[in-house]
Image (cartoon, rainbow, N blue to C red):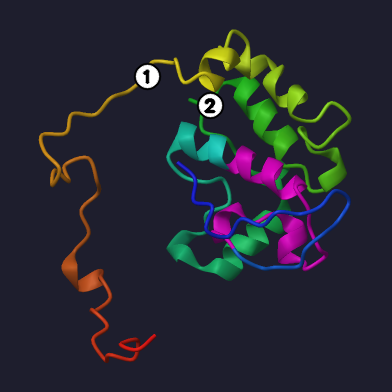
Amino acid sequence: MVDFGFAKRLSPNSKTWTFAGTPEYVAPEIVLNKGHDRAVDCWALGVFIHELLVGKPPFRAAGGDHMKTYTLILRGIDAVTFHPRVPKSAQLLIRKLCRAVPAERLGYLKNGIADIKSHKWFLGFNWEGLREGKLKAPLIQPVSNDLDLSNFEKYPKDKLPPDETSGWDVNF
């Protein structure tokens, strides 16, 4: 569910200034190049929960314009209108995870991740079952064979970039 291609291990109380990641998930301190730490993970969790519930991240700009996306991020979560299907408890959780000030984010406070796990939206969730890998998946899509792509969106071929065939990497 998550790509750790840009993951970086930081020592406690240290920051990094690497600007990388999916634009819609980038926290304000990354956009502003202020240096960031693990608080960005709390922000990204809020964005991810929104995307799971709504089907898109809360800061997606029309047309995929990254600069507009960053402007929406800097405007903040309080400027986001939630879809009616998002329960109030989930809205509260997302708003607490996506605070503009990193030190105010749920998960980055004194009790750390325990604050997220004990949030009202997770009431009754079996964290132990998750840790042990014993939870039943809530949705299992049918797959007829290894080449079955029926559960993925279809994109027109003219929108795909052409294959790179220059051979620049032959001796790489």
Q: Is residue 134 left or right of residue 159?
A: right
- Where residue 135 sits, quadrant-wise, is top left
Q: Position of residue 15 (x, y in %)?
A: 82, 59
Q: Residue furthest left?
A: 144
In whole angstroms, how far apart are the C-alphas of marks 1 and 2? Answer: 18 Å
Q: Is residue 169 left or right of residue 159?
A: right
Q: Nearer the viewer, residue 114 or 44?
A: 114
Q: Which residue is mark 1?
A: 138
Residue 117: quarter of image: top right
The question of residue 118 being in magenta is answered with no
- Please state which of the two labelled residues, at mark 1 or mark 2, is closer to the viewer: 1
Q: Where 11 sits versus 23, above or below? A: above
Residue plotted at (59% across, 16% down): 127
Location of the C terminus by quadrant is bottom left
Closer to the camera in the image, 123 or 61: 123
Which residue extends farthest top?
124
x then y, percent, for residue 152: 24, 46
Judge the density around disc 2: few (<14), some (14-19), many (≥20) Cα neighbours within 10 Å.
Answer: few
Q: Residue at x 49, y 40 (%)?
A: 51
Question: What span is colored magenta in the figure?
Answer: 21-47
- The disc, 1 or 2, on the residue closer to the chain's N-terminal end is 2
Badge 1 amino acid: Pro
User: Badge 2 is on which residue?
Assistant: 86
Judged from the image, the secondary structure of the residue bearing numbered disc 2 is loop
Q: Secondary structure at mark 1?
A: loop
Identify the residue shown where x is 34% and y is 91%: 168
